[in-house]
Image (spheres, grey):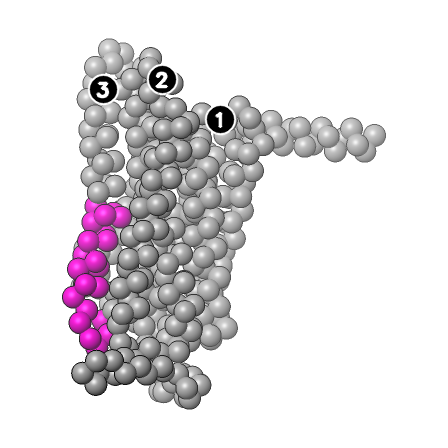
């Protein structure tokens, strides 16, 4: 009944029909319907929770970006990667959450074809960059622990910037391919997307022509975005563990390991929930899967700045200095 009401709300001229060779009609809908949260009981309370998470993510990542920008002592290669992570988290939250809240809270369930493709491109690109940022930070940690005396010579600003630029280019290219393959599909089956945003899997399954390229890229993309980064991070920590085992005293060993706790927390927050959803997604209720998947995409941008502010001594000290300078400046101005 809800779908019937939604379909009746979509304008009459919703599809573009283009005649191809062999009299095959290519159907490009003017609108898609996002149905992910429809029918879930008490879902508006969950949206309030999502809105709260989004506000915290924006405030936290903006704070980290501001501190790294204003404090000129935080200019090591590591903090270039931290800055990029905060920028990516802020951008991914802003690309995803306002539209999700608009769709769900304001009942704007339908989205135009072009907006849906754009929505998918930015959401997927920024989500991929979150994983690639963790790879850069992992590389920085393994070099700092394995080569402490030659770290500054081996890990330069140019190297970190080059890695980040490469991953941005790779992510953009990969997601452009994914979106480009979707544009070749004829959507004559349905316009209802069984997800909470313009998700690739539920969308390509709506195609009524050959979806083999889309199915292939749907298998390859998680391997490239999640599998390879996780394998690199696990391998790097095996190297870190080997290096730590060579340190003679427990005190020095724990001191070196403590520099990795923040990064390990970020890795766990990003990879564990999404891995759980992929492994058990087929055996849990579809509504539970949609909520779990949405949480995996909104929690890391909120928790990442909290972890780095609380666990990174340099950022905590910088924040205290900036706040102290701000308060002192106000007192001087007042008197």
Compute the Cα span from label 2 to label 3: 19 Å
Q: Quadrant of the N terminus?
A: bottom left
Q: Is residue 18 magenta?
A: no
| Residue that carries the numbered disc 1 in the rendered image | 75
- Tags 2 and 3 touching, CB below 8 Å: no
Dot 1, crowdedness within 10 Å: few (<14), some or many (≥20)?
few
Along the viewing direction, whichever of 26 and 188 lies nearer the viewer: 26
Q: Where is residue 304 drawn, in percent x and y?
A: 41, 42
The label on residue 153 is 2
Q: Residue at x 21, y 46 (%)?
A: 227
N-term mark: 2 or 1: 1
| 126 with respect to 217 (left or right) | right
| Residue that carries the numbered disc 3 in the rendered image | 243
Along the viewing direction, whichever of 80 and 304 lies nearer the viewer: 80
N-term mark: 2 or 3: 2
- Tags 2 and 1 touching, CB below 8 Å: no
Along the viewing direction, whichever of 137 and 16 lies nearer the viewer: 16
Q: Residue at x 24, y 74 (%)?
A: 207
């Amino acid at each position: 009944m809800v779908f019937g009401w939604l379909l009746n709300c979509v304008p009459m001229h919703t599809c573009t029909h283009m005649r191809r060779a062999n009299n095959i009609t290519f159907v490009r809908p003017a609108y898609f319907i996002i149905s992910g949260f429809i029918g879930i009981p008490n879902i508006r309370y969950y949206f309030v929770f999502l809105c709260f998470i989004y506000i915290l993510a924006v405030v936290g990542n903006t704070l980290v970006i501001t501190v790294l920008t204003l404090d000129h002592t935080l200019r090591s290669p590591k903090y270039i990667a931290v800055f990029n992570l905060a920028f990516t988290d802020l951008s991914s939250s802003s690309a995803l959450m306002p539209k999700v809240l608009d769709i769900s809270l304001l009942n704007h369930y339908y989205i135009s074809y072009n907006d849906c493709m754009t929505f998918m491109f930015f959401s997927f690109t920024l989500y991929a960059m979150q994983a690639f940022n963790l790879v850069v930070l992992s590389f920085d940690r393994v070099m700092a622990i394995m080569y402490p005396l030659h770290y500054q010579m081996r890990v330069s600003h140019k190297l970190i910037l080059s890695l980040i630029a490469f991953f941005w280019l790779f992510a953009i290219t990969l997601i452009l391919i994914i979106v480009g393959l979707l544009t070749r599909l004829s959507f004559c089956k349905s316009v209802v997307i069984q997800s909470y945003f313009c998700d690739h899997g539920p969308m390509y399954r709506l195609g009524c022509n050959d979806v083999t390229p889309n199915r292939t890229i749907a298998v390859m993309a998680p391997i490239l975005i999640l599998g390879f980064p996780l394998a690199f991070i696990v391998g790097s920590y095996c190297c870190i563990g080997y290096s730590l085992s060579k340190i003679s005293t427990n005190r020095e060993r724990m001191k070196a390991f403590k520099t990795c706790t923040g990064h390990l927390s970020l890795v766990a927050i990003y990879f564990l929930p999404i891995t759980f959803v992929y492994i058990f997604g087929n055996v849990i209720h579809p509504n539970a899967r949609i909520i779990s998947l949405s949480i995996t995409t909104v929690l890391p941008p909120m928790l990442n700045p909290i972890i780095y502010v609380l666990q990174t001594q340099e950022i905590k000290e910088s924040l205290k200095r900036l706040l102290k300078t701000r308060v002192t400046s106000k007192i001087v101005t007042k008197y």
